[in-house]
Amino acid sequence: MPKKRRNKRSPLQKLFPSVLPKALEPDCRRLYQLASKNSERLWPQIQRAENGKPDNSLVDQFFRLTHSGMQEAQIDIVNSLLDKHKHSDIKPAQLLAYRGVADAIAWQLLNNELAYAKRFFMAEVPPKPTESNIQSVVSVVDNIHKAEPNSIALISDLTSFIQIGDVMHMRPNKGMSIYEVKEGSINKEIMELLNRESDSQGRHEVSSGEGRKYNSESFLRQLERARRQKNRMSSLHSTLLNDKGIDAATGKRVQIFEPQMQIDSWYTELLEAYEACKSRGWGISVVQNCLYMGCYETGKFATPGQIAFETWFSALGATQSCPRTSLVDCMLDPLALPVYSIPIPDELKFDLLFGRKHIALGLNVPELIKLCQQQGIQVEFASQKTTTQALQQGTLLWKLDGRGIILSNGRSQGFLGEGFILRVFFHGEKPIDALSAIANC
C-alpha cells in the first residue's frame, strides 16, 4: 500500500498562527497569574537583597506563594477539564490553553532548561485527562499538598511533555521526585513482581499459576508496560543525577553539556520590533544578519502581516525551504517554551494568544552557513546520499532541501540535530550562538 503524501504547507501558510477563541481569555489570564506570578509582590524585595542573597524567611515566603499559586491553578484546570456539566467534551482549544499553563509550571520547575525537559519527553501523544487515571492522581496530589503545603506536585498528564511518571513533585531545598500512581490489586501484584526483579537484579519469570490467576495475556502486557515505565524512571533519575545516562525514549547514551560559550537571546530585538508596532502597527528586526522577525497588529497594518513579512523575507534572499513560523505556534510544540513562559510583556503574550498581534520569524539558512564559515565555525551541507544513509541509521537530523548539515569542531563531526530550529525559534537563542555552542559540545 503506497504511503500517503504529506500535504506540504507553502511558506506563507507556515506564517498563519493558530490562535485561541476570545472566550478563553479571562480563564487564561487568571490561570497564568496563579501559575507564574503569584509571588510577584516579593520580587522587588528579592532583587534588592544584599549580595543577591535574600534571607531565609523571604525565600520561604517566596516558595510558599509560588507553589500555592501553582496548586490553585492546577486545581482549577482539573475542575474545568472534568466538569461534564459545563463541557460535554474537551474542546481542543481549551485543552491547548490549559496544557500551556501546566507546561509553564513544568518549565519553571526545570528552570527553562531544554536539555532536562527532553529527558521527560517520549514523543507520545498525551492522553486527554478524561482518558487517564487522573482521579487517582488528583487524590495522591491532594495528599502530598496536605502533607507538604509548601511544595508543588504537578500532574504529568496535564502537560504536553512530562511523559515519565504521573506526578512531578518539587520541594524547596529538597529537589525533585517523580512518582507513578498505581491502583487496584493487579497493579499491586505487578509492583511486587518488579520489586522482586530489583532485589534479584534480573527479570522475574511469571509462573503459569500467576499467569492463569490474572488472565495471563492481559496481565503480562500490563506487567511489561509497568516494567518499561520503571526502566524509564530509572534512566531518568540516573541522567538527571549525573548529567549523563541512557535516554529513556531512544535507548541511546546522552550527556548534558554546559555550553562552553554564552548563548545570547534575541528577545531584546523582538521588543524593539514590538515597540515600533505599538506606535505604527508594524515593526521589524534582524538578528545576526540571518534571523528575521516582524511584529504586526492585526487589522491595523494595511497588508496582512504574513504577506508583508514573506515579501520582505524572500526579497532579502530567503529561499522557500528556509524555515519560518509564527511565534505563537510554540503552543503546538511540546518542547517549546509556551507563550506564558517567554520573557515578553504580558499584554503581548495575550495579544499573540488571541490574535490581536502576530509575530513572524524566519531563518535564512544559506546566509547563516556563510556567516558561520566566515567566523571559523566548521559547517557544511552533506550530500543527499550521505543524508539518506544517516536517516536510515536512525539519526535525528535537521534537513534543508533534503540535505543535512554537518558540524565539525576539529576533533569530531556530526549532523546538526532536529532541535536546532526549536532552540532558535522557540527558546530565543541567537542562531550563530546556538550553532557554535552545538559544534563545540
Image: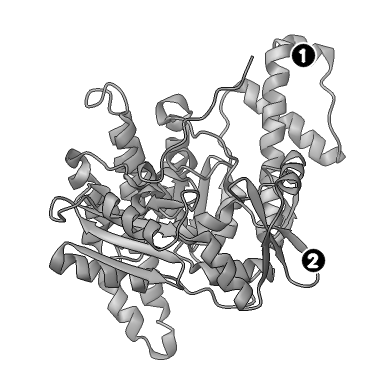
In the rendered view, tell whether residue 388 sits above or below residue 314. Answer: above
In the rendered view, tell whether residue 197 sits above or below residue 362. Answer: above
Q: State the residue position of label 1.
A: 211
> How many other residues sit within 10 Å of disc 1, few (<14), some (14-19) or many (≥20)?
some
> Where on the picture, by quarter, is residue 41?
bottom left
Q: How far apart in space, not on screen, are marks 1 and 2 (Cα)?
A: 51 Å
Looking at the rendered image, the disc whose residue lies closer to the viewer, 1 or 2, is 2
Q: Nearer the viewer, residue 189 or 95?
A: 95
| Residue that protrudes farthest toward the bottom in the picture | 51
What SS does tag 1 mark? helix
Image position, residue 300 (x, y; %): 13, 55
Amino acid carrying label 1: it is Gly
**What residue is at 62 percent from the left and 70 percent from the top?**
437
Quadrant showing the N terminus: top right
**What residue is at 40 percent from the left and 82 percent from the top?**
54
Image position, residue 201 (x, y; %): 86, 41
Image position, residue 381 (x, y; %): 67, 57
Q: Earlier in the sequence, mark 1 or mark 2?
A: 1
Q: State the residue position of label 2.
A: 412
Viewed as shown, does residue 173 lie left or right of 237?
left
